[in-house]
Image (spheres, rainbow, N blue to C red):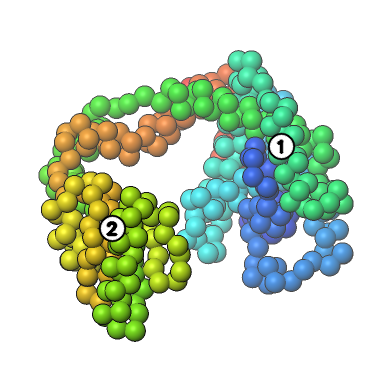
Amino acid sequence: MKRIKYSVTAIFLGAVLLTTPVVASTPAPSPAASGASVTSEQAVATPDKNEIESNRKKAAEARKEIVARVNGVEINMYDLLGMMNRVASAFYKDVQEPSEEITREIRQRALDRLIFEELAVAEAEKQGIKPKAERTQEVIDNLKSSYGSEEGFAGYLADIALTEEQLRVRIDRSQLLEGITGREVYQKSGKDPAAVDRLYQEYKEAGKLKKAENYQIKEILVMAGKDVQATRATAEKLQAQLTQNNNDFSKLMLDGTFIVRRYQVNKDKNPAIFEKMLGMKVGEFSGVVQDGDTFHIFEVLHKEPARDLTEEEARTMLEDRLSPYFQEKRRQEWMKDLRKDAKVEILLDDLQQEAGETTVKAQK
């Protein structure tokens, strides 16, 4: 068996580390912006033709270099490097120069993720989940649009060492992964009442179960005129127009003397407005209110003082906060189940040693 040599610095190969597009309805970014590690010098400099060809050759070679097999399906170095970049961006943002140990850790997590994804896609096919051709076409169309021409799109395909048909297969695969993850993780992630109870008691004892005050208005803010009297006169004129138009802000003619906005009122920053609001109901209009050097005419949209959350509100909030934990717990359980009968071959030297053997029969 071929022993693959792996460089610690491979994660920083820049243009070679181009992530495979995922299903999306928005235009895809250019390859250099799609997750690759790019230095400031690379960001400024435009690669010349020789550099582009060199990077494309590296990408093609990386696609041929097999690092693992999952039930006979191959995982290549290119995909591993792309996943390493994603893992590093998500979990190692503060690491400027990763040590060999950290790089090894990133590599292991990335490979585990790729193995999981391959098993998950196989499970999606087993469960009869089908990709939508129109969605795949939408991604392709968005990519072509973002590159401006067929030539630009062809260059993108060359950069990532894929044909258009291979790219379509990748996008279909992303749909399968999305569908099975929704079914097996998000729909099946349970709740842990005991964990919610513990967090509820912790927050309650720390006095954290409070809802912040919420005072919102929609207002006419009158721009400063020659002096206070002139500004007040403008405000009173606007007030008369607003009353005449049944308090419809949209019927006021914007002439540069005022703006209309939604505003979150702070009792310390806006004392006069806050005091006026206290005696008003939601939906009421204020008339002209002077607050320091400014003049306002407003409608009360929302007014709620700070208060303690009810137990039901607190538990709902804490369940939402714990939801990512429950989902990750379910994901880990599902991963173990998927790997239980899977045949996984690791072909990287150092990860072989860590696994203890070339062919790993994953245990439950």
Out of 121 and 114, give the one closest to the viewer.
Answer: 121
Q: Position of residue 221 (x, y in %)?
A: 34, 66
The answer for how far apart the CA atoms under marks 2 and 1 are is 45 Å
Q: Residue at x 30, y 33 (%)?
A: 319
Q: Residue furthest front?
A: 244
Rendering quarter of residue 357: top right
Out of 153 and 338, give the one closest to the viewer.
Answer: 153
SS at mark 2 in the image: strand
Mark before the other along the chain sequence, 2 or 1:
1
Residue highlighted by disc 2 = 298
Q: Position of residue 294 (x, y in %)?
A: 27, 73
Out of 223 and 117, give the one closest to the viewer.
Answer: 223
Rendering quarter of residue 349: top right
Out of 342 and 189, give the one closest to the viewer.
Answer: 189
Rendering quarter of residue 50: bottom right
Q: Please name the amino acid that badge 2 sits on.
A: Phe
Q: Position of residue 42 (x, y in %)?
A: 70, 68
User: Quick one: quadrant of the N terminus?
Assistant: top right
Q: Residue at x 23, y 28 (%)?
A: 194
Residue highlighted by disc 1 = 138
Q: Residue at x 54, y 53 (%)?
A: 89
Q: Position of residue 133 (x, y in %)?
A: 73, 27
Q: Please name the amino acid that badge 1 sits on.
A: Glu
